[in-house]
Image (spheres, rainbow, N blue to C red):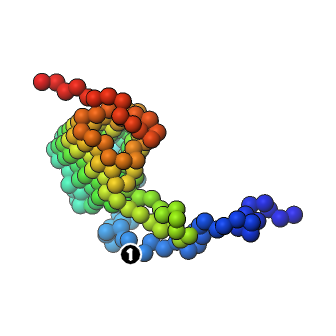
Amino acid sequence: MMDPASTIGETRNQWVSLGAFRVGNYTPGRSALVCGLWYVVSLIVFQSGWFPFYGIKRSLLRVFGATVGRAVVIKPCVRIKFPWRCQIGNDCWIGEDVWIDNLAAVRIANDVCLSQGVYLCTGSHNHRSIAFDLIVKPIVIEEQAWIAARSVVLQGVTIGRGAVVAAGSLVTGDVSSGVIVAGSPCRVIGERIGST
């Protein structure tokens, strides 16, 4: 008896052929040796829950090409795909289980908080292409923004100055300065009141 899943291509259009996927002219931006070395350092120091030393983490990111400001807090179990495509300002907090999946540049300004489990995703695929072409776009998070726990920010998005992304939100487009957004996809639910 034939597996029903194997007959789908015979009765419907073919939407994707993953065997046809090629990365095209995309490169990780460093040699295989540097990427491999970062992978090991990341596993031991950043993704591990056994290494709480923020200063050493900041220094290692700089060694691998990241721009990292002063007093950045990087909690345990953080994943950063390519540090050489990462810019983090002063006094930022990177919470546990944050994943900065930066196939393209990620710029995080001063005083930004990424709470537990935040996922910054700079990559996607063209669903209209049978070869599932790779699409990468940068993410910018402006100063004093707060991305709350378990939120997802997609490629090409700018989070404005002082904006708040509520817990569990999906951000698919730019967020204006000083607003609070929530939901999946997120929408504006209020304004952030600053202190004077």
Relative image position of residue 14 (x, y in whole percent): 64, 68
Within-10-Å neighbours for mark 1: few <14, some 14–19, many 20+: few
Amino acid type of disc 1?
Answer: Asn
Residue 77 at least partly seen: no
Dot 1: element = loop
Judged left or right of residue 34, residue 125 is: right
Which of these two is toward me, 135 or 47?
A: 135
Residue visible at 12% across and 24% down?
196
Residue farthest along the right direction in this orientation? 1
Instruction: From this view, report whether residue 152 is shown above or below residue 64.
Output: above
Judged left or right of residue 150, residue 57 is: left
Residue 25 at least partly seen: yes
Relative image position of residue 147 (x, y in whole percent): 33, 38
Instruction: From this view, report whether residue 188 is shown above or below residue 122.
Output: above
Residue visible at 24% across and 34% down?
178
Residue farthest along the left direction in this orientation? 196
Q: Which residue is mark 1?
A: 25
Residue visible at 31% across and 57% down?
138
Quadrant containing the N terminus is bottom right
Q: How many marks?
A: 1
Which of these two is toward me, 194 or 76?
A: 194
Residue visible at 48% across and 73% down?
22
Which of these two is toward me, 117 or 46?
A: 117
The quarter holding residue 7 reads: bottom right
Relative image position of residue 122 (x, y in whole percent): 38, 56
Which of these two is toward me, 13 or 26?
A: 13
The quarter holding residue 95 reads: top left
